């Protein structure tokens, strides 16, 4: 029982991070109908930005943890959004109006480019940072096993919940959110009404990247190590989360992320830890075969 | 002059859809475009928004050349389109659709504009929290017109507003067109298959054939013209 509760906490932490990344996939799919395979690498880039920022802070002798975290978050969000913007501008916008496959291939190219760029500039080794947030609270001191929530886990879960509430509010209640949804439903019509469609698409990429940046900072704080390849697996898992929730659906991405995190944690705890990735990707296959529209997605309707 | 199209050509892929269009709309006029399916009526309207972009010729709106202006800027300058097939945002509420119509309008006017549109179409007030996709075809058309009016356009473009609607809604649409023009001084460019009704409500009209204007005149002149009668009015023209 105590062990299961611990796995629940671990799973929630993992799921929060997957959910943050999954939103970027689902929003981009919603607005331009493509899977941005470079999104996982955007996340990886943000983790490196976070590491650099932490290193700079350590060099500057900043010891206040809240101050350091805020600074790193702001820096990571700023630069990662810029990456998101640049990727859309250079790799996807020139291909708009071409075949559906072209931006997809371009996305894979961009993913490889980002991985290699980071590998060349930052090196292929795993980069560690000293622990930022150590310790936690013991929730339940059960006989033989103490259930603990780490400060970093608490930080991840709380930040994610706050962000998701803010984000949902923005999409459903603000003029920008309305324009974003209008572009999703009928881009030409939105343009006819005066919405700057190109700008809305750019902002969508930047928002997705900003959320991935938060996930990148969190992963750095949580694990304390990054390498140039972490974007691949995290990206595909978040993509699985988006598909499971129903690609194109925002609440779906959040739910999907949560489920994938929980499944992974429980699978690793009770079944075979070494097969946890297999579990995730089996889910991807099963969802695609049995329910391609996902848990909360709309069934694909052919437009005439 | 509200709108002048001078020698406009446009292409849709390999199709040469507009072949030297000259059309003028004066302030306060209702002008109608009639023509068979595929004559280029919708293309003509969309070309005002640069979709497709005019490959030759000039489009002048309200004294300014808008031939190369980006699509989203056109709405800002005062042209609103009620497109063919309505194209309302199905998964948004009725109110959100109207808010989309006010995308670039002055927020100070929003409350007044909303009240005006809802007075014109009371159904849009009753159903404001409902998803737009659940409205009937006629109601969706009202919503599409209401959405266009939310921006206080100088020129209102209506593309086949009566297509596929029940007779009661068709009557209502033509009544609204007349009212908007007479009581609010709205300048309207109307594309219709329903040539008989359209020519009756319009001050002037153009006949479009294979991307060219083949005939122009007042509504009455066109109604009485033997070519128009033969091609568009007799044999099912009375809708």
Image (cartoon, coloured by chain):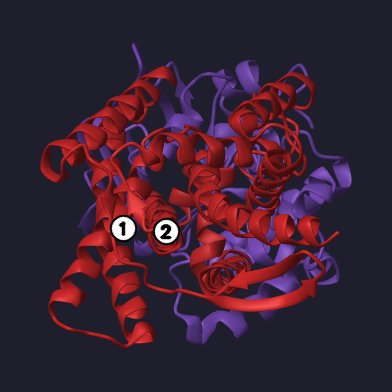
Chain colours: A red, B purple
Q: Residue at x 71, y 50 (%)?
A: B91
* Residue drawn at the location 42% of the way across and 58% of the way down: A207
- Image quarter for residue A273? top right
- Residue B99 in the image: x percent, y percent? 60, 68
View extreme (top): residue: B14
Which chain's residue wears label 2?
A
From the viewer's side, name the closer residue of B113 and B225.
Answer: B113
Pick the front one: A59 or A70: A59
In contact (CB < 8 Å): disc 1 and disc 2: yes
Q: Can residue B7 be seen here?
A: no
Residue pointed to by mark 1: A81
Q: Is residue A26 left or right of residue A126?
A: right
Left or right: residue A188 compared with residue B169? left
Above or below residue A235? Residue B12 is above
* Front residue of this view, candidates B24 and B143: B143
Q: Under tag 1, what secondary structure? A: helix
Q: Which residue is identified by label 2? A: A207
- In the rendered view, would you say B229 is above or below A140? above
Q: Answer few, some or many: residues within 10 Å of disc 2's Cα (few below 14, many 20 plus, some between 14 and 19).
A: many
- Quick check: B149 left or right of B119? left
Location of residue A294 by image quarter = top right
Q: Callout 1: 10 Å neighbours few (<14), some, many (20+)?
A: many
Q: In the rendered image, is residue A170 in sight? A: yes
Image location (x, y in percent) of residue B214: 41, 22
Asked if marks 1 and 2 fall on the same chain, the answer is yes
User: Label 2's element?
Assistant: helix
């Amino acid at each position: 029982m105590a062990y299961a509760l611990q796995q629940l906490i671990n799973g929630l932490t993992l799921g929060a991070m997957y959910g943050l990344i999954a939103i970027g996939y689902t929003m981009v799919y919603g607005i331009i109908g493509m899977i941005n395979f470079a999104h996982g690498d955007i996340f990886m880039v943000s983790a490196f930005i976070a590491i650099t920022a932490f290193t700079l802070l350590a060099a500057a002798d900043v010891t206040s943890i809240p101050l350091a975290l805020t600074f790193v978050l702001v820096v990571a969000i700023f630069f990662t959004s810029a990456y998101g913007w640049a990727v859309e501008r250079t790799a996807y916008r020139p291909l708009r109006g071409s075949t559906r496959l072209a931006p997809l291939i371009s996305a894979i190219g961009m993913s490889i480019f980002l991985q290699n760029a980071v590998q060349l500039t930052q090196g292929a080794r795993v980069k560690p940072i000293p622990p930022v947030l150590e310790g936690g609270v013991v929730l339940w001191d059960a006989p033989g096993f103490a259930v603990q929530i780490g400060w970093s886990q608490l930080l991840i879960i709380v930040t994610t919940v706050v962000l998701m509430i803010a984000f949902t509010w923005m999409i459903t209640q603000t003029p920008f959110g309305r324009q974003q949804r209008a572009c999703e439903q009928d881009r030409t019509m939105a343009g006819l009404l005066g919405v700057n469609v190109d700008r809305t698409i750019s902002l969508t990429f930047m928002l997705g990247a900003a959320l991935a940046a938060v996930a990148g900072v969190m992963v750095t704080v949580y694990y304390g190590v990054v390498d140039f390849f972490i974007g691949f697996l995290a990206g595909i898992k978040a993509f699985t989360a988006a598909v499971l929730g129903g690609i194109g659906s925002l609440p779906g991405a959040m739910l999907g992320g949560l489920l994938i995190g929980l499944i992974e944690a429980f699978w690793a705890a009770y079944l075979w830890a070494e097969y946890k990735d297999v579990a995730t990707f089996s889910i991807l296959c099963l969802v695609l075969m049995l329910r391609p529209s996902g848990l909360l997605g709309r069934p694909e309707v052919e437009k005439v | 002059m509200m709108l002048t199209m001078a020698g406009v050509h446009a292409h849709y892929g390999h199709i040469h859809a507009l072949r030297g269009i000259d059309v003028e709309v004066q302030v306060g006029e209702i002008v109608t475009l009639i023509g068979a399916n595929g004559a280029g009526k919708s293309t003509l309207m969309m070309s005002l928004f640069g979709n497709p972009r005019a490959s030759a010729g000039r489009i002048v709106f309200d004294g300014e050349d808008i031939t190369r202006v980006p699509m989203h800027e056109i709405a800002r300058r005062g042209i609103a389109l009620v497109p063919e097939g309505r194209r309302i945002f199905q998964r948004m509420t009725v109110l959100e659709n109207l808010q989309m119509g006010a995308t670039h309008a002055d927020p100070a006017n929003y409350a007044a504009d909303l009240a005006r549109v809802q007075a014109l179409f009371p159904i849009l007030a009753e159903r404001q929290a409902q998803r737009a996709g659940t409205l009937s075809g006629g109601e969706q058309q009202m919503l599409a017109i209401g959405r266009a009016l939310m921006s206080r356009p100088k020129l209102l473009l209506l593309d086949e507003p009566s297509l596929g609607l029940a007779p009661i809604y068709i009557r209502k649409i033509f009544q609204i067109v007349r009212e908007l023009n007479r009581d609010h001084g709205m300048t309207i460019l109307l594309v219709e298959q329903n040539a008989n009704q359209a020519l009756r409500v319009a001050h002037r009209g153009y006949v479009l054939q294979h991307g060219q204007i083949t005939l122009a005149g007042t509504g009455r002149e066109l109604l009485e013209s033997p070519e128009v009668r033969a091609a568009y009015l007799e044999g099912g023209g009375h809708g």
